[in-house]
Image (spheres, helix red, strand yellow):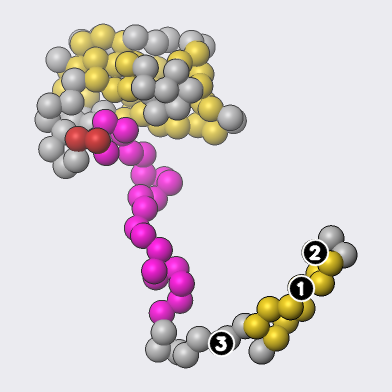
Amino acid sequence: MKLRITIDGKAYEAEVEALDEDEPPMAEYAPPYPSPAAPVHPDTRAAGPDAGDVKTCQSPVTGLVMKVNVEPGQPVLAGQLLMVLEAMKMETNLTAPRAAIIKSIQAAAGDSVKINQILVEFE
């Protein structure tokens, strides 16, 4: 089947082929990515499934600290929300890569942070 598409007044022709029903749609060829609703800690991606040696949480973006949800001495569980960053009007949740105790917090709400800046240290 041929289609004609007009963009900014210029016409383009394209041939389109219908897929057989037993061919999977293109979405099935896409690589799997984590759900946007499931926060992923940047250190967890780098360390893989064994995040037991991760001692810091670094900023994955250059942005602004919106909220800090933990304090020094507080125990946290793997996946627990540590802080929320904002970059380009998008919020990014930073979560604990493992169960740990918070050793120190290097940023406060309202602080500007750079990419890879250490924000939280774990014991």
Instruction: Return the x and y of residue 29 as percentages of the image width and height.
Output: 39, 69
Q: Residue 71's quadrant in the figure?
A: top left
Q: Which residue is mark 3?
A: 18
Labelled disc at residue 12: 1
| Residue visible at 47% across and 90% down in the picture | 20
Q: Which mark is residue 7?
A: 2
N-terminal of the pair, mark 3 or mark 1, is 1
| First in sequence: mark 1 vs mark 2 | 2
Q: Nearer the viewer, mark 3 or mark 1?
A: 1
Q: Is residue 117 visible?
A: yes
Q: Quadrant of residue 43?
A: top left
Q: Which residues are magenta?
A: 24-45
Disc 3 crowd rating (10 Å Cα; few below 14, some 14-19, many 20+) is few
Q: Position of residue 22 (x, y in %)?
A: 40, 89
Q: Residue furthest right?
A: 9
Q: Residue at x 50, y 31 (%)?
A: 91
- Asked if the residue at tag 2 contacts the one at tag 1, i.e. Cβ–Cβ closer than 8 Å, the answer is yes
**Is residue 30 positioned above or below 93 on the image?**
below
The kind of residue on which mark 2 rests is Ile
Q: How many marks?
A: 3
CA separation in Å, label 1 and label 2: 8 Å
How dense is the environment of label 1, judged by Cα within 10 Å: few (below 14), some, or many (20 and up)? few
Question: Secondary structure under badge 3?
Answer: loop
Residue 76 vertical placement versus 71 (above, below): below
Q: Secondary structure at mark 2?
A: strand
> Do the residues under discs 3 and 1 have CB atoms within 8 angstroms?
no
Q: Is residue 44 magenta?
A: yes
Q: Is residue 68 left or right of residue 52?
A: right
